Image: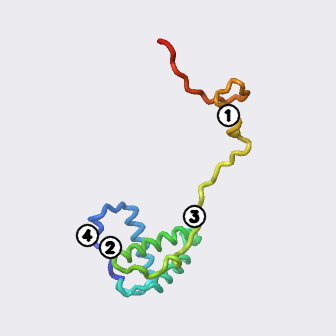
Amino acid sequence: MKSPLPRASRQSKDWRKHTLQCYRLALKLFTESCPKTYIDEIDGDDLRRFKIFLRTLKTSIGKTIDPRNVWNHFNNTVAFLNTYGRRDLIKQSEWPMYEEKGVAQPNFSGSLSSSQFSTGDPGSDTNCRVPTAQTRTGAD
C-alpha cells in the first residue's frame, strides 16, 4: 500500500500528536497484514485478514492485545480507507467485537439510607440534618 496520509491533509487539520501516532500505528499494522500496493486494490477480505492479524498480536510482555485495542486499530484503518473512497468494504457486523467495561458501582450496604436523613423535622431523632431555608426577619 503506497498511499500514506498526504502532507497537505495533515496540515489542514488540527491533528494532535497522539492521534497521528495512533493512525500511523494502525496503518503500519495494516501494511504488515496486507501485501497489496494500492488502495484501490484493497477489499473486504483484506480487512477480515487484518482483524485476524490484530487478534494474534502480542504486547511487549507476551499477552494478546486487548479487544478494545483491536477495534481501535481496525476503526482507524477503516476511517483512513473511507477518506480515500474505499467505503463499505466490510459490514459493521463483521467488525471486531469488544465488551464495554462498565464503571464500578459503589456498594452502599451498611451506609446510611435516604430514609435515615432528616429534612429538619423537629420530631426526627436522626443525627443527620439537612438545613432548611430560612428567611431573615429584622435588621442585623
Q: Amino acid at mark 2?
A: Leu
Q: Residues within 10 Å of mark 4 (few under 14, many from 20)?
A: few
Q: Residue at x 52, y 79 (%)?
A: 94
Q: Amino acid at mark 1?
A: Phe
Residue 70 relative to residue 37: left or right = right
In which quadrant is the N terminus drawn? bottom left
Mark 1 or mark 2, earlier in chain: 2
Q: Residue at x 59, y 61 (%)?
A: 101
Q: Position of residue 9 (x, y in %)?
A: 28, 69
Numbered circle sitting on residue 100 = 3
Mark 1 or mark 3, earlier in chain: 3
> In terms of depth relative to the viewer, which is nearer, 54 or 136?
136
Q: Position of residue 113 (x, y in %)?
A: 70, 40
**How far apart, in angstroms, are the residues tagged by discs 3 and 4?**
36 Å
**How far apart, in angstroms, are the residues tagged by discs 2 and 4?**
9 Å
Residue occupied by mark 1: 117
Relative to 85, say whether 140 is above or below. Answer: above
**How far apart, in angstroms, are the residues tagged by discs 1 and 3?**
36 Å
Residue 48 relative to residue 117: left or right = left
Q: Which of pointers 1 and 2 indicates the residue nearer the eye?
A: 1
Q: Residues within 10 Å of mark 1 (few under 14, many from 20)?
A: some
Mark 1 or mark 4, earlier in chain: 4
Residue occupied by mark 2: 5
Residue occupied by mark 4: 8
Q: Which of pointers 3 and 4 indicates the residue nearer the eye?
A: 3
Q: Residue at x 55, y 26 (%)?
A: 133
